[in-house]
Image: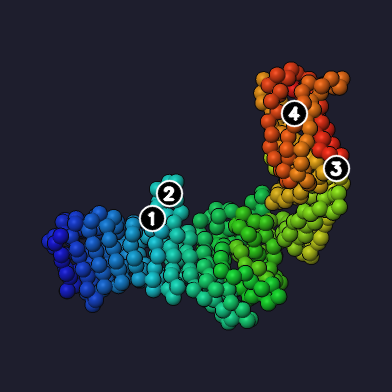
């Protein structure tokens, strides 16, 4: 392999191929030493098997496509006058300087793969977009490692897409992630924390929160916070977020705004702290839980901010509880249940609070869980707006109490003639059991013995394939306990 060490300014030549406008490194080792600037007015292609080591500055007027080894402990400067593309491959970059002076709409640096920066992302002019301009391209992440920072972001020059910033040890005091997010802790440690900002994409459920109809939405910027240790709810953190005018997304700065939190950008959202003003596009509020944060006007990005939903056993019944932090045009909740987690049926209805900025608590009791004849019951809520729009909650489950020490199920049931049937039997005690299959007139068709373990077991029903269309009864008896199951062939 040949090697070229650049000691002066703007040196280009053998073994690089091409004119000064396009440089192709095909299998060579090129070194740009500290204090040296390599200026290329066009594209640079570092092909597979090639090595480009930069300890100084590589200034690019065109694209940089890396398929080999690119190690830049110095500065990569994208200073074109039209859109540029950086395909990083397996690159390591200390400093990325963006100074694209093209006309508005033609001054983008497209980063087409995940890229980590070790020291500094410096935005001087132009935009960065962490995605290829080709339709359907995946969204990438520009990641700033622990100690690295962002400088110079402002309206007309900032990162569109995902900008993640890592901090190795976040403890008490103020930690600024430099991507529009900072956190102040009273006296605790979160350990390693990564804050990923998604912005500028104009896509609901990805870069901003919204209600199902899209009529209420937050700024075009969200921050996902992932920490090694959970936040101590007894010692709330102060969250401060900021954004640029490009990402206002219709927010009214002359009206109160609110910080909102959710488990994911699709919601549901819960208000954090008190509403306030954000004339400078900076807003602070207290939070007792980490997650995904955004800002909207004091009306929520989602009509109901559901902060909890639980389901538990209450004797032989199921007890559902849920709470909201705020509600917007909430007409009612519909409670639904299922035995398979797929097909749900209506159980009841609970009136909502309409529009309210106050917290509200609700509950619903589902009587006699044993009637489901299933080991688990699945529950969900359907929150219905005044206009009839519905939004579903997460699903919760409750274990069904055993009836007489037994719970017997058949899959499938009903079933078609000629198909097999499997039995699922749950018992509270181990021991021999007798299974008797009869028709509806009580005539015994078969009998088998089984040694049942404690808990759940699955057994085939050998006679199932011979059963014609009709209704049958399966009686399972273990000691003094018995369970009768109806089998349907249709």
Q: Residue at 84% of width from left, 36% of height from top?
A: 482
Task: Tell me the tag on residue 429.
Answer: none
| Crowdedness near tag 1: few (<14), some (14–19) or many (≥20) residues, C-alpha within 10 Å | many
Tell me the residue that label 4 is attached to. Answer: 448
Indicate which disc, 1 or 3, sits on the residue closer to the N terminus. 1
The reply to whether the C-beta atoms of the residues labelled 1 and 2 are less than 8 Å apart is yes
| Crowdedness near tag 2: few (<14), some (14–19) or many (≥20) residues, C-alpha within 10 Å | few
Whether residue 260 is visible: yes
Distance from label 1 to label 2 (Cα)? 8 Å
Tell me the residue that label 2 is attached to. Answer: 137
Horizontally, residue 340 falls left or right of residue 78, namely right
Query: In front here: 327 or 88?
Result: 88
Tell me the residue that label 3 is attached to. Answer: 404
Mark closer to the observer (2, 3): 3
Tell me the residue that label 1 is attached to. Answer: 112
Distance from label 3 to label 4 (Cα)? 21 Å
- Quarter of the figure with the N terminus: bottom left
């Amino acid at each position: 392999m040949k090697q070229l060490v650049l000691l002066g300014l703007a040196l280009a030549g053998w073994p690089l191929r091409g004119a000064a406008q396009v440089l192709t490194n095909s299998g060579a080792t090129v070194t740009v030493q500290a204090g040296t600037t390599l200026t290329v007015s066009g594209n640079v292609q570092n092909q597979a098997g090639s090595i480009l080591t930069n300890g100084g500055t590589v200034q690019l007027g065109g694209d940089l496509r890396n398929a080999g080894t690119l190690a830049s402990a110095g500065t990569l400067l994208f200073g074109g006058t039209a859109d540029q593309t950086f395909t990083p491959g397996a690159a390591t970059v200390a400093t990325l300087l963006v100074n694209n002076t093209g006309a508005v709409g033609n001054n983008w640096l497209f980063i087409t793969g995940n890229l980590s920066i070790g020291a500094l992302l410096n935005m001087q002019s132009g935009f960065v977009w962490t995605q290829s301009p080709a339709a359907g391209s995946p969204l990438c992440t520009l990641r700033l490692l622990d100690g690295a920072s962002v400088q110079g972001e402002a309206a007309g020059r900032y990162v569109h897409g995902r900008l993640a910033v890592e901090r190795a040890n976040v403890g008490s005091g103020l930690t600024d992630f430099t991507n529009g997010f900072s956190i102040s802790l009273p006296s605790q440690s979160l350990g390693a924390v990564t804050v990923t900002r998604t912005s500028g994409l104009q896509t609901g459920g990805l870069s901003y929160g919204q209600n199902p109809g899209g009529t209420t939405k937050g700024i075009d910027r969200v921050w996902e916070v992932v920490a090694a240790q959970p936040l101590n709810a007894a010692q709330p953190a102060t969250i401060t977020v900021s954004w640029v005018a490009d990402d206002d997304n219709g927010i009214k700065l002359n009206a109160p705004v609110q910080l909102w939190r959710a488990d994911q950008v699709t919601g549901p959202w819960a208000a954090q702290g008190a509403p306030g003003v954000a004339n400078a596009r900076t807003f602070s509020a207290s939070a007792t839980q980490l997650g995904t944060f955004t800002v909207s006007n004091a009306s929520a990005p989602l009509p109901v901010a559901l902060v909890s939903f639980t389901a538990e056993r209450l004797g032989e019944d199921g007890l559902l509880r849920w709470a909201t932090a705020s509600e917007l045009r909430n007409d009612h909740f519909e409670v639904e249940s299922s035995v398979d987690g797929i097909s749900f049926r209506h159980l009841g209805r609970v009136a909502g609070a309409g529009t309210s900025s106050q917290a509200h608590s609700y509950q619903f009791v589902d009587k006699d869980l044993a009637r489901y004849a299933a080991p688990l019951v699945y529950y969900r809520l359907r929150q219905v707006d005044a206009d009839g729009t519905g939004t579903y909650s997460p699903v919760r489950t409750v274990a069904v109490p055993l009836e007489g020490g037994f719970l017997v199920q058949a899959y499938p049931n009903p079933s078609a003639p000629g198909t097999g049937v499997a039995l699922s039997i749950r018992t509270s005690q181990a021991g021999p059991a007798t299974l008797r299959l009869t028709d509806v007139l009580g005539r015994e068709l078969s009998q088998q013995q089984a040694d049942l373990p404690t808990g759940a077991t699955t057994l085939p029903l050998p006679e199932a394939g011979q059963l014609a269309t009709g209704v049958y009864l399966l009686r399972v008896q273990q000691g003094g306990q018995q369970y009768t199951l109806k089998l349907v062939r249709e």
